Image (cartoon, rainbow, N blue to C red):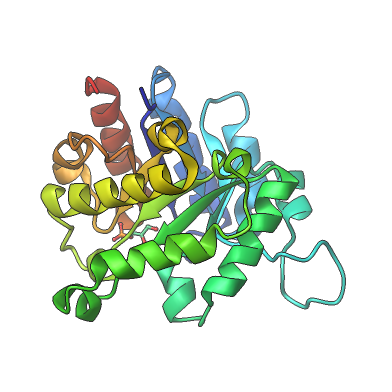
Amino acid sequence: MRTLFLAGNWKMNTNSATSVNLAAGLVRELAPIQNVRIAVCPPFVYLQSVAAALSASQIELGAQDVYYEGNGAFTGEISCEMLKDCGCTYVIIGHSERRHILGESDRLINLKIKAAVKAGLKPIFCVGELLEERDNGKTFDVVEQQIRKGLEGLSAEQVKTVTIAYEPVWAIGTGRNATPQQAQEVHERIRRQLKETYGAELAEKMTIQYGGSAKPANTAELLAQPDVDGLLVGGASLKVEDFAAMVKTAAALKK
Ligand code: 13P
């Protein structure tokens, strides 16, 4: 049995007031929910105030990125220790917006994942194909390679701490989610790859989230898929009622 895991990726949204209000609203709405893992990932500058708003709640905190060096002359970057100092449990690594807008490579993503795991942060490691890659029948190859390169050099023990988020790039922010069948097909392949590399026991325990236009209306059908263990939510995580509705739907599912 895998506990469902819903994480909100706030991306470059909110301000000091709205970030705290959003967090406080979720704390209020979701207080009774104990059977779903919940996290929010605000922009770096609001981590501490959101951490304060979440304190004494079961909702955990994550960051949207991290740098792999410990400290030093890396202007503009944020280290794992800084994130832990701000109360983070999770960190998103390899998001498609960082891969495709900021030009992050598989190698850089691998360095970040290794640093995060060593520091005791739990990575939410994003993978996913472009529309062109899907249309050319390359989805499985692309995702398989991203996973292999991203997790290179990690022991099975370390891989256990990683959540994988399958986020097809064409589904992100477009309103066009992958169908539950499309998501399941890729998740199943990811779990098979994890099994081949790290063994069946580990593969069965790994959480694989889906991300890309996830919203209240499609939450139940996506989470009903056997290998979809949670959601990484962008736009819909910015509204208390939407994200809370999604978590409540997850809590009510018998998986
Ligand atoms: P949307 O839910 O806005 O499509 O974003 C998904 C995403 O990129 C989460 O990381």
- Please state the horizontal and vertical placement of residue 143, each as a whole percent of the image: 35, 64
Q: Is residue 239 visible?
A: no
Q: Nearer the viewer, residue 80 or 215?
A: 80
Q: Is residue 165 left or right of residue 150?
A: left
Picture coordinates of residue 21 (x, y %)?
Answer: 49, 43
Number of numbered markers = 0
Res 230 seen here: yes
Residue furthest right in the image: 72
Ligand 1 image position (quadrant)? bottom left
**Residue at image x 61%, y 57%?**
113
The residue under the point 22% across, 34% down is 226
The residue drawn where x is 64% and y is 62% is 112
Q: Nearer the viewer, residue 66 or 8?
A: 66
Q: Tell which of 88 and 157 is nearer to you.
A: 157
Relative side of 242 to 39, left or right: left
Q: Is residue 96 above or below residue 206?
A: below
- x, y percent for residue 128: 33, 65
Place of residue 136 in the rendered image (x, y in percent of width and height, measured from the top left): 17, 79
Snapshot quadrant of residue 64? bottom right
Q: What quarter of the picture does the C terminus occupy?
A: top left
Q: Against 172, is 74 above or below?
A: below
